[in-house]
Amino acid sequence: MTTPNRFTPETLAKAAASRATAKSAVELVKQAGLNVDSTTEAKILARVENMPHFCRRTYLTAMRGRSRNSAVKAFCSMCMGWERVEIPLCTDPACPLFPYRPYVEHASGPEEPEEPDETEGHGD
């Protein structure tokens, strides 16, 4: 049994047109309005140039400091080799972001541990 080809001539043409109109990494970084020094901007640009186009917007949103969700998505994407389908399959439960992984249904969300009361155990 053969699987149908999901890449039809129409979808391939649409993807090619999208890539042709995509902004360059330099344009995206300049338009992102990052409030960083030139050295940091150069490092961000180098990273953006080496990531897939579909990850760039999320990464830059995270780098602007506007979204913690975008920061988690960007970090998990980088860690998993820019493969979104790999994120739910993460095998590192020791990662501090593991309970917050995107694209995974969480039962009730990660629970915040209760902070110990600093005055507890100190008698009057």
Image (tube, rainbow, N blue to C red):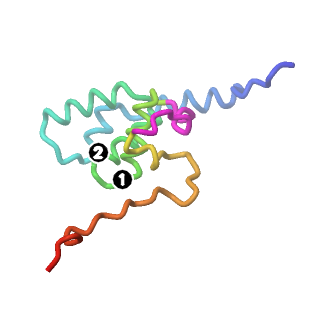
Q: Is residue 38 left or right of residue 70?
A: left
Q: Secondary structure at mark 1?
A: helix
The furthest residue to the right: 1
Asked if residue 30 is positioned above or below residue 5 in the image, the reply reads below
Which residue appears at 36% of the width and 54% of the height?
67
Residue 2 within the magenta-colored segment of the rendering: no
Residue 85: percent from the left, percent from the top? 57, 34
Which of the two discs, 2 and 1, sits closer to the camera? 1
Which residue appears at 35% of the width and 31% of the height?
24
Q: Nearer the viewer, residue 86 or 37?
A: 86
Q: Which residue in the structure is indicated by mark 1?
A: 68
Residue 17: percent from the left, percent from the top? 54, 31
Asked if residue 58 is positioned above or below residue 118 in the image, the reply reads above
- Lower position in the chain sequence, tag 2 or tag 1: 2
The quarter of the picture where residue 58 lies is top left
Q: Which residue in the structure is indicated by mark 2?
A: 63
